[in-house]
Image: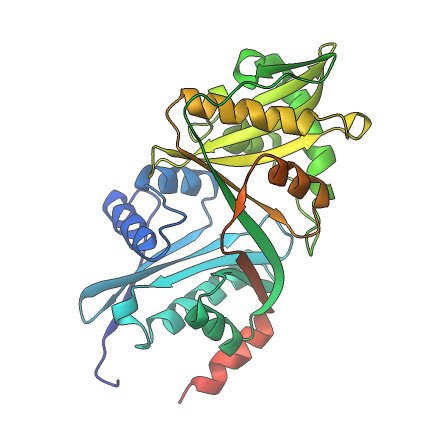
Amino acid sequence: MNDVEVEIAELAVGDRVGHEAYAALWNAVVPRYPITPDELERSRARRPDDLRLVGRIDWAVAGCAAAIRSDLPGRTYMGNVVLPEHRRRGLGRAFLERCLAAARAHGSEVLAAGVEEGDVAGEAFAARYALREVLRELEISRPVRPGEPDPEPPEGIELVELSSRLDLLPAVYALACETLPEMPLHAPLEMPSYERWVEEDATGPDVLAGGTLIALDGGTVVGFSGLIRRAADPHLAEHGLTSVTASHRNRGIATALKRAQIAWASRSGYRELQTSTQAANAAMRAVNDKLGYEPRPAWIRVEGALDEVEAALARERP
């Protein structure tokens, strides 16, 4: 153990080769959430203070890690993956130390991370360093079959592609600002800026324009449902935010939006749609159940105060 040589390289924003290595490592360990180097570079351009690392053990590329400022205030999110054949050799711990330092630089008070349900080693690593479960994101997916039917919208409601009504972007953002804070999270969500929201959720290169829809009532925006490409898998897409203004709920608008997305995905060659929601979000869970989405292993969010994580690390130092 003492003879193991661990080397960690911090990736610069424009490091294409480094981002290719990072994406390959991430996809090998977390194949359910594949990424591409292009997606990674766009994310880094939007968040220039993110930290991205690639680690080697005895000169072999062995893992990658990230420290990303969270949209939940006072938190930095850590991604930390090591190839199975290189685990228990100190790289994950070294990544944690670097991510902890980045969280301090962000001004955060809490380090957050995600563990896939059933990942015994990941749960043990989190517990070892004072990261405790605070939330479970319920992951679900639905196969997309040929010939999925278009929905019949509720009376008086029109469904249109957002890309055809870009003049309504400010109104759609206002709807997001109304509905995102209602999500049953363990901490208040900090809304992204209008510019970042447009880039990530409405019209950016990772947004599937034909499947990103709005619901109109007499020309007024009353619903929105985003659809995001997963560029590493051309047959997979991910639902973004689906929201309906309070005055128009319980009329079937959210269901119609998602049915329209399923039909568009079918026509466009997609074979699977996936999304996630919180256990306490009963309304959206009912919509997803009605549409035939099936559960997958949950994504467990764990968090720890930086002081407690640092103390757990210090206890292991010689």
Rendered-image quadrant of the N terminus: bottom left
Vertical arrangement, residue 114 with respect to residue 15, above or below = below
**260 vs 309, nearest the viewer:** 260
Query: At 36% from the left edge and 40% from the top edge, which residue is drawn?
Result: 41
- Number of callouts in the render? 0
Q: Does residue 253 appear anywhere in the picture?
A: yes
Query: At 59% from the left edge and 74% from the top edge, which residue is drawn?
Result: 307
Q: Where is residue 26 in the image (x, y as percent from the top left)?
A: 34, 53
Q: Position of residue 282 (x, y in %)?
A: 71, 45
Q: In this view, does 139 lie to the left or right of 183?
A: left
Q: In this view, does 272 lie to the left or right of 190?
A: left
**257 vs 21, nearest the viewer:** 257
Question: Residue 304, located in which quarter of the rendered image?
Answer: bottom right
Q: Residue furthest left?
A: 59
Q: Residue furthest right?
A: 247
Q: Where is residue 73 in the image (x, y as percent from the top left)?
A: 65, 53
Q: Does residue 173 appear anywhere in the picture?
A: no
Query: At 65% from the left edge and 36% from the top edge, which residue is drawn?
Result: 287
Vertical arrangement, residue 150 with respect to residue 15, above or below = above
**256 vs 228, nearest the viewer:** 256
Rendered-image quadrant of the C terminus: bottom left
Q: Position of residue 60 (x, y in %)?
A: 19, 65
Q: Which residue lies furthest to the top in this view?
A: 218
